[in-house]
């Protein structure tokens, strides 16, 4: 379980996949997009204010997830963002986009199109993450 309290909106909108280096890894419930969210254990809300070592750990995670999305989802574009206008808790979005997706070329935030993941797909994504990056998760499911 996360050591930090996740913002209520993140809890409602995402699946918790696990913990990586004191960072919660979430997957958006909207299966239209491979949309991962990293929530580091910090009270800070701005990335640039984190200590350099903490930034580096997060950059490494961002790069690993970006490579994972590119490898497994055949995306056309990858979006990485730390917007946080509605949810101020620091969180980093890694979103794979397709030129054929329901929001293209617009933003995914506020997209009114929603699709549930089929049974077993979320577990399959988590299992694939563990296969691609053995030892990535520091806490049990």
Image (cartoon, grey):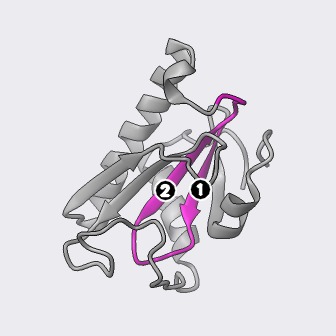
Q: How many numbered callouts? A: 2
Marks 2/1 in contact by CB < 8 Å: the verdict is yes
Q: Is residue 114 magenta?
A: no
Instruction: Estimate the x, y position of residue 10 in percent, counting from the top left.
Output: 66, 59
Residue at the farthest front position: 85
Residue drawn at x 55%, y 47% as measured from the top left: 84
Residue drawn at x 69%, y 33% as measured from the top left: 41
Q: Give the class, few, some or many, for how many residues have Cα within 10 Å of label 1's Cα (few <14, many ≥20).
A: many
Q: Is residue 22 left or right of residue 30?
A: right
Q: Is residue 106 above or below residue 40?
A: below
Instruction: Estimate the x, y position of residue 85 in percent, counting from the top left.
Output: 56, 50
Magenta span: 23-44
Q: Which residue is mark 2?
A: 36
Q: Is residue 136 left or right of residue 62?
A: right
Residue drawn at x 29%, y 69% as measured from the top left: 106
Q: Which residue is mark 1?
A: 26
Q: Is residue 138 left or right of residue 100?
A: right
């Amino acid at each position: 379980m996360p050591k930090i309290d996740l913002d209520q909106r993140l809890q409602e909108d995402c699946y918790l996949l696990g913990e990586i280096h004191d960072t919660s890894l979430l997957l958006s419930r909207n299966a239209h997009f491979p949309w991962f969210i990293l929530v580091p254990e910090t009270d800070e809300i701005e990335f640039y204010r984190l200590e350099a070592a903490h930034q580096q750990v997060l950059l490494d995670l961002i790069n690993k997830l970006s490579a994972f999305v590119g490898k497994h989802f055949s995306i056309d574009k990858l979006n990485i963002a730390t917007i946080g206008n509605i949810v101020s808790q620091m969180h980093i979005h890694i979103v794979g986009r397709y030129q054929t997706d329901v929001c293209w070329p617009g933003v995914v935030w506020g997209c009114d199109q929603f699709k549930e993941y089929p049974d077993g797909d979320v577990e399959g994504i988590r299992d694939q993450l563990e296969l691609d990056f053995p030892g990535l998760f520091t806490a049990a499911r």
